[in-house]
Amino acid sequence: TLDKNYLYFAEKLGAKVEPLRSVCDVRALDGGGYEVVHERSDRWFRRDRRTIRARNVVLAAGVLGTVRILLEAKARGSLPNVSDRLGARVRTNSEAVLGVTSREDVNFSKGLAITSSVHVDDHTHVEIVRYNEGSDALAPLATMLTDGGGNVPRALRYLGNIVRHPLDFLRTLWPFGMSKKGVFLLVMQTLDNSISLKLRRRWSSLWQRAIDTDRGEGAQNPTYIPLGNEIARTFASKVNGVPFSSIMEVLFDVPTTAHILGGATIGASAETGVIDTKHEIFGHPGLYVCDGSMIPANLGVNPSLTITAMTEHAMSQIPAKPGATARHAVDPDLVARRTKEIDALASQLGSDSLQAKGRAPAVTDADELEQSSSDA
């Protein structure tokens, strides 16, 4: 986790980390630089609002944090030049979160959280995930696996499953022990589908402006992945288990993702993206995005190393202060080569659509880049 790697080393180098703070606004200043307004996130009252001024600011709040901050700042005029592409091409990694709970008294919780995965076709990747015994908080979100599609409404199929397998349904209502007797199957794809994020006033937010979703560019997000369901059933047959998926997917055709990406993606210009190949926001010099918001495609794998590699690349583009000595050497040839690759990707994003084929067209050789520019 960040508190044990990047933030730990940042503090060792003199950075000040303030936990339990939420950003309320980022304002561009007339003479250059930015004001960041923030307050306590663990209080309802006396939230200790403060303002920090900085010449350069890096946004790394994750998709739902970074995109929300930028959408709100653009709407209130604090960052008026942010591209209208903000919130577009939000990716879910084309995921489905499935799993299996054994009917027997077994223990699948021992060992590493993620140990193996398999590419079952050219664009589908399945990963097995386990939790420590007692980590049952996600259990109420799971219910009996039910296919979508066809002429019969999915909710009716779900009711049919309950009638045919009442004991299995009752097992899904008992959350305790799921992490011990169950495993998750994370199904990820590189297909070109997306959603978009918007600011809207809705009753659920008491008519305050809040993040909402729309259908995105390209194909619609899958409401279920047939191959993933087939794999879950096969796994269940091997361990005498009950296959499950998320209750939101089964009842409302709303899939679940563990890896939301995009929304402030790289582009050749403000007409095609929010940030340039140095991760600087078009129209706002010195304001950077370095998190999953910058990822332009469904990766089909866990995105952490791609995010890390792209962030290391972005930081390598920031020149050292005059007279300062770089703490870590960065291979300039490698940086130039990676910059050329990312420029080519940005040009591709300027076309009608990014067609993700096979493995995702993100930063290549992430391990090589990480090794060469580690802690840059």
Image: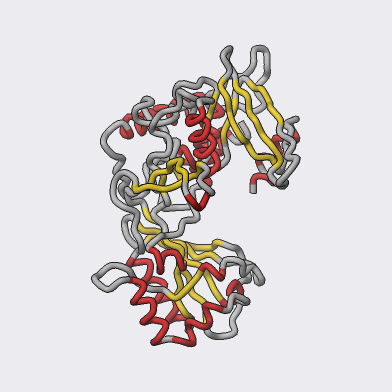
Location of residue 275 by image quarter: top left
Q: Judge whether 191 appears above or below 349 on screen.
A: below
194 versus 351 height, above or below: below
Residue visible at 70% across and 35% down in the picture: 10
Q: Nearer the viewer, residue 259 or 359?
A: 259
Tell me: residue 171, above or below residue 39. Answer: below
* Residue depicted at 31% across the width and 31% down the height: 350
Residue 59 is situated, as x and y percent measured from the top left of the image, at: 57, 34
Front-most of 328 and 106?
106
138 vs 17: above or below: below
Q: Which percent across, then down, holds residue 61?
A: 57, 40
Horizontal relation, residue 238 to residue 219: left or right: right
Give residue 209's position: percent from left, percent from top: 50, 41
Q: Quadrant of residue 238?
A: bottom left
**Which residue is at a point 60% across and 72% down the rendered structure image?**
179
Residue at point 38% right, 73% down? Answer: 146
